[in-house]
Image (cartoon, rainbow, N blue to C red):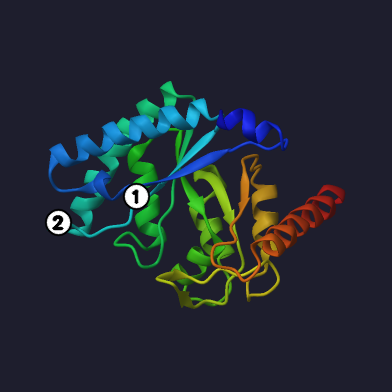
Amino acid sequence: MLRGFLARYNVKAFSIQTGAAGAFRKDKGAREAWLKDFARWARFAHRAGCEAIGLWPGGGLDGQTLDQAIDALVGTLREVAKIVSDEELLASVEIEPPFVFHTIDDLIKIIDGAGHPLVKGMYDPSHFDLMNGGKGKPEELLERFGVERLGYIHLTDTDGTLFGGTSKHLPCGDGHVDIRKSLEILWKGGYEGWIMIDPWMTRDPYDACRRGRIAIETARRELGRA
């Protein structure tokens, strides 16, 4: 029913976002229970016509050290890889500055630890900016992370501050990020995945989406000529 409804507007749901706090719980049974729930979401995503599924590992350390929590998450993601492979999906892990996993090193350890081509990381310039000191240069961490580790993109501008418990999101051009530089890195790195305009808590989401699309199309034309 959902696929038919979306088709009437000539659009598709390319991904859904899922919580993943249970994916790194200390108790193995809790992690296994989360995997069962995730498998149902992945099945739904496949039937809805999605190509990807996002994982959002917020939550506390549950009495573990950071390294132990990463190890627990990595073990779960290896099982996630089997599920998304069966459902023909790509899993993309998003971390944010307020999370217990909040550095580019954390994300690299998580993705490399999972070690599967269908388990990747999310690039959101607002989060990468704060992880890089809030200086308006998230592309520095994007280059360090590497395009080959990317699942898909949450595209947004930011001013390097926190808002609503996470990185502030702004329409492209309203913040201090050079969106063009990020898009150039993606272009040169051969990125061919989805880019979602992320208008979370922006004043006018429709305008944010329009301006994000303009930024992408302008960069594509300019880089294509180059």
Find residue 116 and report its horizontal and vertical position in percent: 41, 33
Report whether 110 appears left or right of 92: left
Report whether 45 appears left or right of 56: right
Look at the numbered discs 1 and 2 and tell me whether their residues touch, using CB distance below 8 Å.
no
Find residue 75 and report its horizontal and vertical position in percent: 25, 38
Report the number of numbered marks.
Answer: 2
Q: Amino acid at mark 2?
A: Gln
Quadrant in which the N terminus is drawn: top right
What's the CA distance linking mark 1 and mark 2?
Answer: 17 Å
Q: Residues within 10 Å of mark 1 (few under 14, many from 20)?
A: some
Look at the numbered disc 2 and give the secondary structure of its residue.
Answer: loop
Look at the numbered disc 1 and give the secondary structure of its residue.
Answer: helix
Residue that mark 1 sits on: 109
Seen from the viewer's position, the closer of residues 69 and 168 is 168
Q: Earlier in the sequence, mark 1 or mark 2?
A: 2
Find residue 120 and report its horizontal and vertical position in percent: 46, 42
Outermost residue on the right side: it is 225
Above or below residue 223? Residue 160 is: below
x 51%, y 36%: residue: 52
x 52%, y 72%: residue: 168
Q: Amino acid at mark 1?
A: Lys
Above or below residue 119? Residue 189 is: below
Above or below residue 84? Residue 206 is: below
Q: Residues within 10 Å of mark 2 (few under 14, many from 20)?
A: some
Residue that mark 2 sits on: 64
Seen from the viewer's position, the closer of residues 213 and 8 is 8
Report whether 219 appears left or right of 114: right
Seen from the viewer's position, the closer of residues 178 and 175 is 175
